[in-house]
Image (cartoon, rainbow, N blue to C red):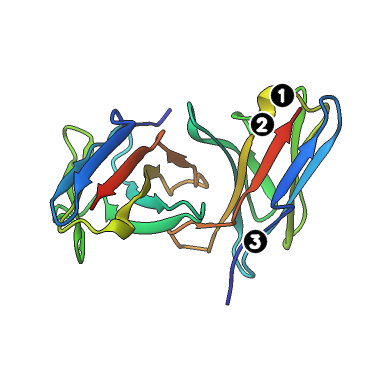
């Protein structure tokens, strides 16, 4: 069974600084997707970034980038030039999409606070 | 604009009562997930459906929880009888065919007293 682990329950960062959120996962699959979702106080879940496991190149979306280490089963999120609006809960997620299975598994989340 | 709709947004009920939460997925989305969010467990997958068929409900307490999808526009999650430990936010999410981004509803905050 797949599992997703986020070992940092809470983190804080000064505005304009860089922060890295950690995520590890466990799977025997070779083809899968990894995601980071953001949940601000409004509770709305927002996709931040997506990585296909078959791609070696790390995904980037503006100030957000990932460090995907497939062999180590590690998928960290780096937020550059942190902004107050980045304050939120961040969830790492895994999805395998094959043979009729579309299981979407989330970690326990990391609460990030950006300080002014 | 297309969105996943969950009702009710908030529910307070007494222990032992039946609770039904509803979800309307985005039109055309054929995979629907139910999650429970708590401080300790994060987002737990309770059950999910594809083309209205249940694929996995192993995350759900079978004795009191049930999930159904009577048609393509409605998914339900029922708790009977409810207990205080069921207090949490319950999310529904849907996935389009061949898509990978899950679209979430606003959640139902359930409080069982």
Q: Please give the name of the residue rendered at 45% of the width and 62% of the height, measured from the top-left corner.
A: B99
Q: Residue furthest right?
A: B17
Q: Earlier in the sequence, mark 2 or mark 3?
A: 3
Choose mark 2 or mark 3, whichever is in front: 2
The residue drawn where x is 59% and y is 29% is B59
Measuring from the top left, give residue B79's x and y in whole percent: 78, 33
Task: In the displayed orientation, state which residue is furthest to the front.
Answer: A116
Circles 1 and 2, Cβ within 8 Å, touching? The answer is yes
**Residue A36 badge:** none
Query: In 3D space, how far apart are the residues under numbered discs 2 and 3 (Cα atoms)?
Result: 23 Å
* Above-or-below relation of A45 to B82: below
| Residue to which mark 3 is pinned | B25
> In this rendering, do the residues under marks 1 and 2 share a single chain?
yes
Instruction: Locate the C terminus of chain B and report the quarter of the image it occupies.
Output: top right
The chain to which mark 1 is attached is B
How far from the left and from the top, in percent, is residue A106?
Answer: 43, 39
In x, y percent, where is residue B82? Answer: 78, 28
Question: Do labels 2 and 3 touch, CB within 8 Å?
Answer: no
* Structural crowding at the residue carrying mark 1, measured as other residues with C-alpha within 10 Å and reported as few (<14), some (14–19) or many (≥20): some
Residue B77 shows in the view: no
Circles 1 and 3 on the same subunit: yes
Q: Residue at (67%, 23%) from the top-left corner?
A: B85
Q: Residue at x 85, y 34 (%)?
A: B18
Secondary structure of the residue carrying tag 2 is: loop
Q: Are marks 2 and 3 on the same chain?
A: yes
Mark toward the viewer: 1 or 3: 1
Which numbered disc covers residue B84? 1
Give the letter of the chain under mark 3. B
In this view, the residue farthest toward the bottom is B1
Q: Which mark is residue B87?
A: 2
Observer-nearest of B82 and A32: B82
Tell me the element at label 1: helix
């Amino acid at each position: 069974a797949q599992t997703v682990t986020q070992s940092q329950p809470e983190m804080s960062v000064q505005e304009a600084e860089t922060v890295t959120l950690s995520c590890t996962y466990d799977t025997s699959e070779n083809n899968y997707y990894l995601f980071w979702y953001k949940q601000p106080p409004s509770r709305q879940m927002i996709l931040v970034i997506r990585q296909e496991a078959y791609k070696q190149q790390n995904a980037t979306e503006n100030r957000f980038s990932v460090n995907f280490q497939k062999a180590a089963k590690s998928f960290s999120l780096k937020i550059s030039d942190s902004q107050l609006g980045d304050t939120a809960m961040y969830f790492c997620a895994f999805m395998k999409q094959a043979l009729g299975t579309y299981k979407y598994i989330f970690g326990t989340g990391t609460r990030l606070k950006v300080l002014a | 604009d297309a969105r996943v709709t969950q009702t009710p947004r908030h529910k307070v009920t007494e222990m032992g009562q039946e609770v039904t939460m509803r979800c309307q997925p985005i039109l055309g989305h054929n995979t629907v997930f139910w999650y429970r969010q708590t401080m300790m467990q994060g987002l737990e997958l309770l059950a999910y459906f594809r083309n209205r068929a249940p694929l996995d409900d192993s995350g759900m307490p079978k004795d009191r929880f049930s999930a159904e999808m009577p048609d393509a526009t409605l998914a339900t999650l029922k708790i009977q009888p409810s207990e205080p430990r069921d207090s949490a936010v319950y999310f529904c999410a849907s996935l389009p065919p061949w898509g990978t981004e899950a679209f979430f509803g606003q959640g139902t905050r359930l409080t069982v007293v």
